[in-house]
Amino acid sequence: MSRKKAPKSVVKRLPVYLRILDNLIRRDVEIISSRVLSDETGFTAEQIRKDLAYFGAFGTRGTGYNTSYLREKLLRIIGLDKQTKIIVIGFGHLGKALTRYNMNKNPYVKIVGAFDNDPNELHTDIEGLQVYSMDKLSEVIQKEDVKVAILTVPAEVAQQVVDILVENGITAILNFAPTKLHTPEGVYVHNADLTIELQSLIYYSQEDEGRALKE
Amino acid sequence: MSRKKAPKSVVKRLPVYLRILDNLIRRDVEIISSRVLSDETGFTAEQIRKDLAYFGAFGTRGTGYNTSYLREKLLRIIGLDKQTKIIVIGFGHLGKALTRYNMNKNPYVKIVGAFDNDPNELHTDIEGLQVYSMDKLSEVIQKEDVKVAILTVPAEVAQQVVDILVENGITAILNFAPTKLHTPEGVYVHNADLTIELQSLIYYSQEDEGRALKE
DNA sequence: CTGATTTTGTGAAATGTAAAACTATATTCA
DNA sequence: TGAATATAGTTTTACATTTCACAAAATCAG
Ligand SMILES: NC(=O)c1ccc[n+]([C@@H]2O[C@H](COP(=O)([O-])OP(=O)(O)OC[C@H]3O[C@@H](n4cnc5c(N)ncnc54)[C@H](O)[C@@H]3O)[C@@H](O)[C@H]2O)c1
Ligand SMILES: NC(=O)c1ccc[n+]([C@@H]2O[C@H](COP(=O)([O-])OP(=O)(O)OC[C@H]3O[C@@H](n4cnc5c(N)ncnc54)[C@H](O)[C@@H]3O)[C@@H](O)[C@H]2O)c1
């Protein structure tokens, strides 16, 4: 049976459910209802049930969801059931912060290398991390069979770096550079645009003062 | 005349338009059509026109939009016409990267202080930045009349820090901690959850392999 | 100066997403 | 054992957003 494709908004909520489940399991909670999940996530219970229904029926009526079972299912749905290999391009301030964080705090991914074109950045104090110059890119991507890259280079060079990544078989890019990237069909780009987040927050922070909507 | 409230999706696109306009003005482009804006942003021309229409009529039929004029209007709409004062709470890896970036690259906001509870973090090599211990929070917020905070503390302490921020009059928070924050009515929280971005990207990177949607 | 062209601004239709209502199934306890 | 209760899963309805289609207004060419 072929299920309807899940909307983007649903996919964005799956990792939230996963995180809550991880916390619950750590606290030895074995069963959770959509109602309680609702309290923890802020999404409505109906929405949570509907989201999960895109992928199957994982609960028990009258009881709720088994936390470990649902976690396993979510891992498989999201694609985290086997550790995803990732590279980071642009080992500057943000690249370093993200690399360190994902190596220490994110068990679902494995950073197999960081890359920079500045020779001064080719060292690190992060344990277990290799920092390479850009000419090692092809070699590492192929040897490790990497498909996912985090891009933290300046906006001016982002497109040219992306072209190289795509050439070498990268199919998914988390882009922090504030610029629109052009990629061929089949290469996914997610923009994590921190400036946009901040500016739209400022919009809302002023809304109450009645400025924004007046003529 | 009172206009209809702009949807969140529209508000998120306004900073994108602003950025493109900044680039165009830097290249001395004076007039831009919605069609070309569409090419630059990836949004459809109709959508761009409709977005702007929530706030007024800023273009000239037959010609397009004057870049400088539209920029001024957008600045005022978003609330960037006067520099917004911001504080950063949690001067760790991510907090440092964001602070440095916004001090150097983001002319629309002014970081008036960073805060940390670890005495080792109370120094910095960022020019013009003051790093304070947490007991200076009230004082700085009041003296500078700050309303917006960037939150980069560990998830475990995020809620207790938020309570302090709210107590002291902060009304908008950009939250990087992977946890749901509870705030009273009138306090805006935007979650910038980088782990969710990465995990949902992984979902899409596997979609083509036909795994995710099969029974 | 006039008709053709361009491009904005906007109402209507289509699509996508969320919420609500409902149904089915399991559990609990008298 | 069976009625009451709890909760998942499904269908329906409402709402939000995008796309479409075109009128209105400005410009341009001759
Ligand atoms: N730091 C932030 O908080 C922040 C916030 C919003 C957006 N961003 C965006 O994220 C990106 C990185 O920001 P950052 O603060 O880390 O900047 P950064 O200058 O500290 O780091 C950029 C790194 O990319 C490297 N680099 C430059 N050209 C390269 C190339 N062609 N190939 C490989 N590496 C190259 C540089 O050597 C540097 O180490 C930028 O696009 C920035 O606009 C950053
Ligand atoms: N670094 C990343 O790339 C990344 C990615 C995703 C999410 N995050 C989240 O962002 C937050 C910060 O991450 P980080 O990597 O910068 O961590 P970090 O440990 O480097 O920084 C956290 C800082 O907060 C300070 N702090 C702790 N408790 C505090 C308190 N009660 N009051 C004030 N300051 C306090 C610490 O002293 C430290 O300097 C975390 O919640 C993390 O989960 C970070």
Image (spheres, coloured by chain):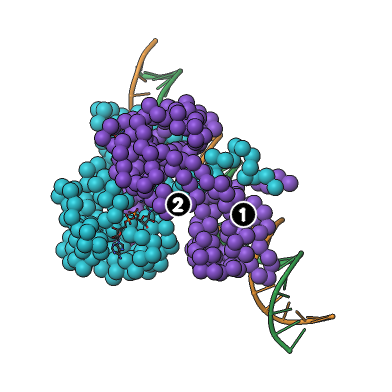
Chain colours: A cyan, B purple, C orange, D green
Q: Is residue B44 above or below residue B9?
A: below
Tell me the distance, in whole angstroms, between the alpha carbons under discs 2 and 1. 18 Å
Between B37 and A57, the one lying in front of the other is B37
Disc 1 marks which residue?
B73
- Callout 2 amino acid: Asn
Instruction: Give the quadrant of residue D30.
Output: bottom right
Residue A81 visible in image: no
Q: Are marks 2 and 1 in contact (CB under 8 Å)?
A: no
Disc 2 marks which residue?
B106
Q: Would you say the beta carbon of the disc 2 residue lies within 8 angstroms of ligand 1?
A: yes
Q: Report whether C8 appears left or right of A179.
A: right
**Label 2 and label 1 in one chain:** yes
Q: Report whether B186 appears left or right of D5.
A: right
Q: Is residue A210 above or below residue A141?
A: above
Residue drawn at (32%, 51%) of the image? A94
The secondary element bearing badge 1 is classed as helix
The secondary element bearing badge 2 is classed as loop
Which label's residue is closer to the chain start, 2 or 1?
A: 1
Closer to us: mark 2 or mark 1? 2
Q: Residue B178 in the image: x percent, y percent?
A: 35, 39
